[in-house]
Image (cartoon, rainbow, N blue to C red):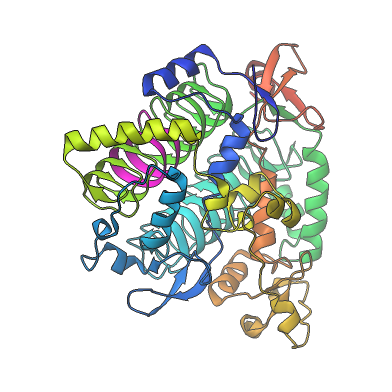
Amino acid sequence: MKNCVNCQAQFTINDSEKNFYDQLKVPEPTCCPACRMQRRFAFRNERYMYHSKCAFSGKTIISLYDPKSPYVVYDYDTWWSEQWSGLSYGKDFDFSRSFFEQFQELRQAVPRMNMSNMNSVNSLFTNHAADNKNCYMLVACEKNEDCLYGKLVQSCKNCMDCNFIYECELCYECVSCYNCYCSAWIHDCHNCSNCYFSKELRGCNDCFGCFNLRNKKHCIFNKQYAEEEYKKIMREFDRGSFRQTENMKKTVSEQFARMIVRDVHQNKCENCTGDYIEQSKNCLNCFDTTKGQDSWYLTDALEPINCMDSCFIYYKPELCLETLSTLKLYDVLYSMYIYWCSHVMYSEYCYNSQNLFGCVGLKKNEYCILNKQYAPEEYEKLKSRIIEHMGETGEFGEFFPVKFSAFGYNETVAQEYFPMTKQQILERGWIWRDEEDKAAAYQGPKYDLPDLIDEIPIDITDKILTCEKTGKLYKIIPHELAFYKKMGLPIPRECPDYRHAARMKARNPRALWPRTCAKCGDEIWTSYSPDRTETVYCEKCYLGEVY
């Protein structure tokens, strides 16, 4: 049993974890798993963007970095060009100083990309994104078309205000859904169409206010109706009315709070603990992990093998520890934004490289330390000396300190999962970014939205609206208005930031609690905390209930 140096909570390291650390020849962690996750999340800004200028060309760009921050930012095309080289920033290691201090100086000197947005068309405001067309304000998204406002939206069309959805079309305010069509306000639904205000449906069509149904159609609040009767009742509900939809949200929320739920979402898994795990084996305390093997403490992982303490890692990362936002890695430790690399430690924003230590912004390089090239034998000798030095300073085995993040803590994923106040953040010596108070500067008239979508005028896209929950200003863009009109849905009264936060809260936290199945009494680990009102069943009892 160990005590976390950050929060003082007790945590254990089991034998398999110890063997993993021994295999990598690194010390055991000093922080608990939650604090380690929080520390990594503090280095990932997904949604906060600034108007800025490329430090190379001077052209106007959209950037994740505050223009007042000390970082050098290039536009995407310039960063990838041959007009500069990361090796030109190489420096010798100074054994009289700490590694993190020297690495931070290198991070502030080497140019970084304004955003990560590859092969996209008319999708300027998308981040950690690739192969999108006509998309706006999406993050962690690929292969989408005509989608707006979402996170982890994959291979979707004409969807808006959705998080964690895959292969969906014409969906609105949907969370954790797969292959759904023409639906709104549904959570954890698979292969459904024309469903509204529902949760945990599989293979259902034309269902309203339902939960835990399998292969049903024409149901209202879990009651079966004939097709004509169902349609008649549905005509009495106008989902284009803001008032009616808000009242319905309250009704179904009360119903969902009393429903029977499965302890965790797992499918085709063996010896796994965690939530939203698919086709995995021996993955412990993992969340949103697909096709994983022999791994611990992962979030947002695709095909990981023998990895630990890593987030947003995709496409067969293997033998990785304390990594963040990576693609296709082997033997990468304590690093972030590393792509198609192997044998890398304590590095950032490197591509198609191997044998790096303490490097930033390298492309197709090898045997480098602090961006300086060495012969292989010289590299290994110097790396060993630096690791020994870091052991003496207490740095080796630790991820980068949060105070060195390029973003304000409140701009990062950490604030979503580990929210803190401005005072708490500043007391820890971390960065806080104050948002510009646009509402105070705006002197125009307040615009009162009509209740019905049919009454919304076309010129609403010229108006500045005020969020009813936060007071922030926001606008309805033409693409967005066309979607509401087509789907017959009301204009939201909350700004995009508030809507995103609400969707994130709709998912269970990435944490596990010991409980007993409410039916058979077996011990379970679940993402439903003991103070929740839902009735929690183990997998066997839940499946027996819904089938």
Q: Is residue 304 visible?
A: yes
Q: Quadrant of residue 53?
A: bottom left
Magenta segment's dominant SS is strand
Q: Position of residue 133 (x, y in %)?
A: 39, 64
> Does the magenta-highlighted stretch encompass residue 204?
no
Give the camera-side residue of 241 and 288: 288
Q: Which residues are magenta?
A: 318-342
Q: Position of residue 358 (x, y in %)?
A: 36, 45
Q: Position of residue 66 (x, y in %)?
A: 53, 68
Residue 309 in sight? no
Residue located farthest toward the bottom when viewing the structure as drawn: 444
Residue at image position (70%, 72%) is: 453
In the image: residue 34, left or right of residue 261: left
- Relative to 268, say whether 334 is above or below: below
**Residue visible at 46% across and 49% down?**
101
505 in relation to 110, above or below: above
Q: Position of residue 428 (x, y in %)?
A: 67, 49
The quarter of the rendered structure image containing the C terminus is: top right
